[in-house]
Amino acid sequence: MIGIKFSPDKLIQNLIKGLPDPKWSKQYNMAYIHNTKANLGIIFTTFKGIVWINYNRFLTNKPINTSNETVDVQWFRNRTNVPEYRLCPEEYLLKLELKRYANSTVRTYVSFFEMFINYYKEKELITIDESDIRNFLQHLVQRNVSNSYLNLAINAIKFYYEVVLDMPNRFYEIERPRKESKLPKVISKEEILSIIENTNNLKHKCIVQLLYGSGLRRSELLNLKIEDIDSKRMLIRVVGSKGNKDRQTLLSRNALKDLRRYFTKYEPKIYLFEGKTGIKYSGASVLKIVKSAAERAKIRISVTPHILRHSFATHLLESGTDLRQIQVLLGHSSSKTTEIYTHVATNTFESIKNPLD
């Protein structure tokens, strides 16, 4: 059943009467109707623009973070209180902690929400309404922030009202910026090989080889452990990737030869790539390795680890690999995400005769 819990309101009560076969539960003190996809749609269209509806219980496909990563919110609590600066409410931190959000998400949400509540220092949070949120977002737009920046701000604000306060009778239909449709930047195989040849040492060479040859995200590379390299099956196991998903991807034979030499020379203990003190290698170091090698290789564009991943996918597509297989290797949830590479693969255009020619 779909339970409909609400504060006494004649308008809502009349709208509920118009739903398909509504009933009242004395046990749970709420109205309810049959749980079907059609009924969920009817609820949405009935109440749209009138009340805010909490759909969280019905989003069964939404990935839940079940990783064992320690959620670090204590340092937010222990910060020194700066005069006239409004700190994130304790209930906000607690909800982030209980939901086991990734630490990067926690830092982002707290940062953006504190920016928002300090914009309205004199207002109680509960009194801030939809127009106030729009005014704040307009302030960000006037600062010429990116669309992704604006979306993060919206997510952090909505998290407070929709998840922390669980407010079923407030309606927040905040306009999001139109999605940008940018094509991925890709470099050629020859340029990739030139970057690998221009790395400083064996360790740096292995890092670039895995970023490209296995299509890894930078965070995935940094989290690789020694046991994740399966040389018998020529696969790499990627654990707890984006969306807390595991997957397997390709291991290059050329990369494996260098990895064996690297392992003998550097003797990593836990993570495949470790810093001098034995801790996990830093993301900033990986970015610097790629950029420096690309500059020495005289690549015209600024190359990042993610461009190597884009190039991996595009080159696979150009060589005839099925799009679904590429989706699995990259760990994309939707095939639509992978389809973007068809817009940059050269074989998309090879069969088209240029009118000038």
Image (tube, grey):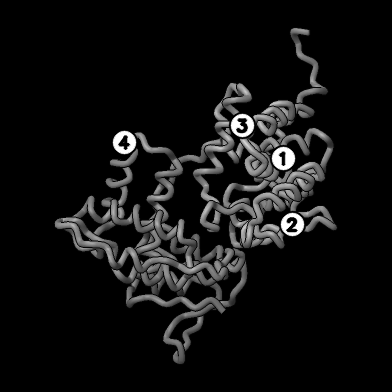
Residue 192 sits in quarter: top right
Question: Residue 86: x, y in percent?
Answer: 22, 59
The relative height of residue 142 versus residue 124 in the rendered view (above or below) is above
Position of 168 compared to 99: left or right?
left
Give the alpha-carbon distance from disc 2 to disc 1, as whole Å: 20 Å
Question: Residue 19: x, y in percent?
Answer: 51, 71
Q: Is residue 169 visible?
A: no
Give the alpha-carbon distance from disc 4 to disc 1, as whole Å: 35 Å
Residue 143 sits in quarter: top left
Disc ID at residue 143: 4
Q: Secondary structure at mark 2?
A: strand
In depth, the one of 25 and 201 nearer the eye is 201
Q: Is residue 298 visible?
A: yes
Q: Give the residue number, with chain letter if any, for mark 1.
A: 313
Residue density around tag 3, few if under 14, some if 14–19, many if 20 or more, within 10 Å: some
Q: Which of the two labelled residues, at mark 3 and mark 4, occupies the earlier sequence position?
A: 4
User: Which one is closest to the eye, mark 3 or mark 2?
Assistant: 2
Give the alpha-carbon distance from disc 3 to disc 4, as whole Å: 27 Å
User: Which one is closest to the eye, mark 4 or mark 1?
Assistant: 1
Q: Which residue type carries mark 4?
A: Arg
Residue 354 sits in quarter: top right
Q: Give the residue number, with chain letter if any, for mark 2.
A: 229
Q: Which of the two labelled residues, at mark 3 and mark 1, occupies the earlier sequence position?
A: 3
Is label 4 in contact with label 2 (beta carbons under 8 Å)?
no
Q: Which of the two labelled residues, at mark 4 and mark 1, occupies the earlier sequence position?
A: 4
Residue density around tag 4, few if under 14, some if 14–19, many if 20 or more, within 10 Å: few
Residue at image position (46%, 91%) is 27
